[in-house]
Amino acid sequence: MSLDGRRYGRCVDVQQGGGGGGREFHRVASELRVRITDGTYPPHSFLPSQRDLAEEFRVSRDTVSRVIRELGNEGWIESRQGSGSRVIKTQWTPSSTPTTPRQWKGATLGPVLSAAFEQPEVLLDVYTLTSESLDAHIRLQAERIFHGSIAPRRIGLRMILPAEELVLPYPRARDDSDDDRLRDRLHAITKRHTESLLGVLGLVRSRTPVDVDVEIRWAPLTPAFKLYLVNGSEALLGPYEVIERDISVSSEGAGEEIAALDVLGLGATLTHHVRDEDANSAGSVFVATWQDWFDSVWRLLAGQPVRLR
């Protein structure tokens, strides 16, 4: 099971169980972001101590310290010496249930996906800068399937990512437009999470009766927003806000902070729109319009798909 060899080579270990401080760093950072977004660590609460996090995740204190610094740079938490790390931002605006008449509202990706995976068929169309957020949430649903708490019959995923050869305006070094390290870092993040996503869905297909179909295409478009279309009836849309922040990169075993222009992806606010029985309602028109947009890009602009094998 692998991605197109022209893009990536062999898949990483889908369990991400060991090896490589970078992999452990991203594993811990992704999990903490998910916990903040799903309310495990609500606004104004404090994260567990760095010692407790290191013990829970079985990583070094240095790895946890780097994660805390990264989350601080991204605006999730505020850390003070002797006081710990306090949550100051969540990813989402509180949402009511999809059955409410109000169509324009904030929502979390986690609960929407959880509800979708409880249905017999799950169809997801995703347009995003990287697959990092989706990877984290799909892994949570895969665990529910493996534990037998949910049993969808079919999972279908189509995802559009920016073409690798595209020169993106972000992330980039603020003071040196010729510095390619942040572009390489973005490609590495996309590769890691895309392979992880394919890996975990491949395990679902091989270990359970679920019929799984995954296709990924690359399009020559710079994402200014992320879009999730769920079962043709719900849409989650959020802009990428451009920010200035320091990004840690590793070079020859040493770490360096780069002043960068980046976007809030995991921290982007999503609005939730629901199709109902009235084809002319605001929610129905919104979902149908963005579904048509996705289908047109998929059909006319995106390259040949990489499929789950």
Image (tube, rainbow, N blue to C red):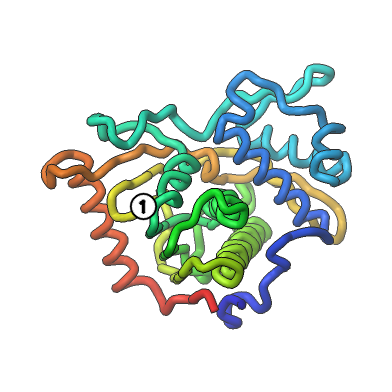
Could you say where residue 171 lies in the image, as x and y percent from the top left? Answer: 57, 51
Could you say where residue 249 lies in the image, as x and y percent from the top left? Answer: 74, 52
User: Mark 1: which secondary structure?
Assistant: strand
Seen at 76% across and 49% down, the residue is 25
Seen at 33% across and 55% down, the residue is 231
Against 162, residue 170 (above or below) is above
Please identify the quadrant where the C terminus is shown: bottom right
Give left or right: position of 287 versus 189. left
Tell me if I can see residue 68 in this picture: yes
Seen at 77% across and 55% down, the residue is 22
Seen at 54% across and 30% down, the residue is 90
Could you say where residue 10 lies in the image, as x and y percent from the top left? Answer: 68, 77
Work out whether residue 302 or residue 242 is closer to the camera in this orientation and state it. 302
Give left or right: position of 105 versus 257. left
Count of numbered marks: 1
Please identify the quadrant where the N terminus is shown: bottom right
Residue 126: quadrant of the picture: bottom left
Q: Furthest residue to the front?
A: 148
Tell me if I can see residue 133 in this picture: no
Give left or right: position of 84 versus 135. right
Q: Furthest residue to the bottom?
A: 6
Could you say where residue 193 lies in the image, as x and y percent from the top left? Answer: 61, 60
Against 128, residue 73 (above or below) is above
Residue 23: quadrant of the picture: bottom right
Identified by mark 1, the residue type is Val
- Which residue was labeled with disc 1? 230
Work out whether residue 170 or residue 8 is closer to the camera in this orientation and state it. 8
Work out whether residue 12 or residue 293 is closer to the camera in this orientation and state it. 12
Sort mark 1 into few (<14), some (14-19) or many (20+) by Cα contacts within 10 Å.
many
Residue 157: quadrant of the picture: bottom left
